[in-house]
Amino acid sequence: MAAPPELIDDATAEIFLRLSPDDPACLVRAAFVCKRWRRILSDPAFPRRYREFHRTPPLLGFLRNRFDRDPRPQFVPTADASPFSSPEFDCKQWWTLDCRHGRVLFRCVEPDGLSWWTRLAGIEGYSLLLWSRHAVADGIEDWVQHRVINLKSVLPIRGLPTIAHLAGVTEGADTIFMNTYVGIFVIELSSGQVRKVGEREQYTIVPYMSFYTPGTSLCLSLV
Amino acid sequence: MAAPESGDGNNGAARMVTLISSDNTRFEVEAAAASLSQTLQLTILDGGGGGGDGIPLPNVDSATLSKVLEYCIKHAPAAANGGAPNATAVDRAELERFDNEFVNIDQSVLYSLIMAAHNLEIEGLQSLVAKKVADMIKGKSPMEIRRTLGFPDPTPEEQAEMNAHMLEYGWAYE
């Protein structure tokens, strides 16, 4: 028993393509409707089409390192209904380094100093400075400061004697993670929206962006 | 039915073609509108569908074909302008209003349209109807989706499977 018989797989997939990546639960629920839908959604061709159709993956959460409490990296969901409720990392002494294209990069020892995002954004007093690549002359590109955000006006840190730490930037640099004494905040640059996603972290956190289609799991690699 | 023999349709009166539905109803429509279908486009460019010939569409019934052609006729002018980059805001708003109303239809008609748009490869219509069904699915539980789309009641076996999944992914049913 399946969908009304006249709807072929390809046309059904066209419908699934239009379910928003920001609400990954939709695809999961669709996979439970019937066997045929589940088969279409778990076909390797579907995630590929879905990525091509939507291009920019949504922010699903972030990974944090907490060597003082638990040596294993932890995934903290920020999406309303995250598909990764509690991924099991059966590894110890891994340091989360980076996330690209839904894959997370870990390292066995502490990273040394600068990470890639420090070149895109930085902190000066209470201002968040953002740079982007621009052509400055024929064929020459350079980093140009294009935006300054006053953190006191966007984060609830007034009157606190502390600075806010830049904790992470997503691929495409549209979302900035700030680590402060009052918690971790996500600033969406395009909308200016700010929301608290967790308590203060002592160590690095890494934003995790990925499309979620049924059958997806965190992809891990180790350096 | 006096359609000109020449293929380019640029000689004054718009060139007409005839489409024949599965139940043998003939539809005469401007070649430009019918050409929104990638499937028909080549045949029409080759000069087909004119005169008494007509292009048979064995997979599309007359009720569905008339609905499809309603869409094509409305969208043909914008498509002729290459997606209408110069269209005014009023024109675009009017097309949007038409689209919204167009898919405000019974689920069974919607399904026939999806299949017709797919077979005839009418990109805009495919996208419009797929988006409509996606909106109908959004935020619903698997059982609600089945009801909304007119699936038969699940067999005991299917129900047991859904329950098992429900335990595993409780959040997906919230």
Image (cartoon, coloured by chain):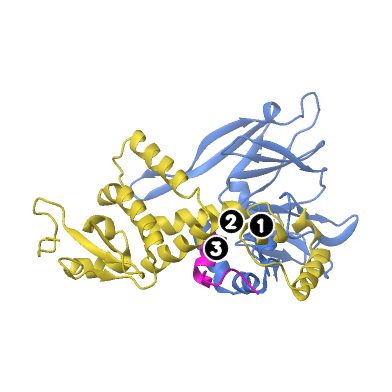
Chain colours: A blue, B yellow
Magenta stretch holds residue A18: yes
Residue identifier under label 1: A26
The N terminus of chain B - image quarter: bottom left
Who is closer to the viewer here, B164 or B61? B61
Residue identifier under label 3: A50
The relative height of residue A21 versus residue B152 in the rendered view (above or below) is above
Counting residues from the start of the chain, the first of labels 2 and 1 encountered is: 2
Q: Which residue shows up at 41% across the image and 60% down it?
A: B64
Secondary structure under tag 1 reads helix
Q: Residues within 10 Å of mark 3 (few under 14, many from 20)?
A: many
Q: Amino acid at mark 1?
A: Cys
Q: Amino acid at mark 3?
A: Tyr
Marks 2/3 in contact by CB < 8 Å: the verdict is no
Report, in whole angstroms, how far the alpha carbon at label 2 lies from the one at label 1. 7 Å
Q: Position of residue B105 (x, y in %)?
A: 50, 51
Q: Which residues are magenta?
A: A1-20
The answer to whether marks 2 and 1 sit on the same chain is yes
Residue identifier under label 2: A19
Secondary structure under tag 2 reads loop
Report, in whole angstroms, how far the alpha carbon at label 1 lies from the one at label 3. 13 Å
Marks 2/1 in contact by CB < 8 Å: the verdict is yes
Report, in whole angstroms, how far the alpha carbon at label 2 lies from the one at label 3. 9 Å
Q: Position of residue A47 (x, y in %)?
A: 58, 67
Letter of the chain that mark 1 sits on in the rendering: A
Who is closer to the viewer here, A105 or B84? B84
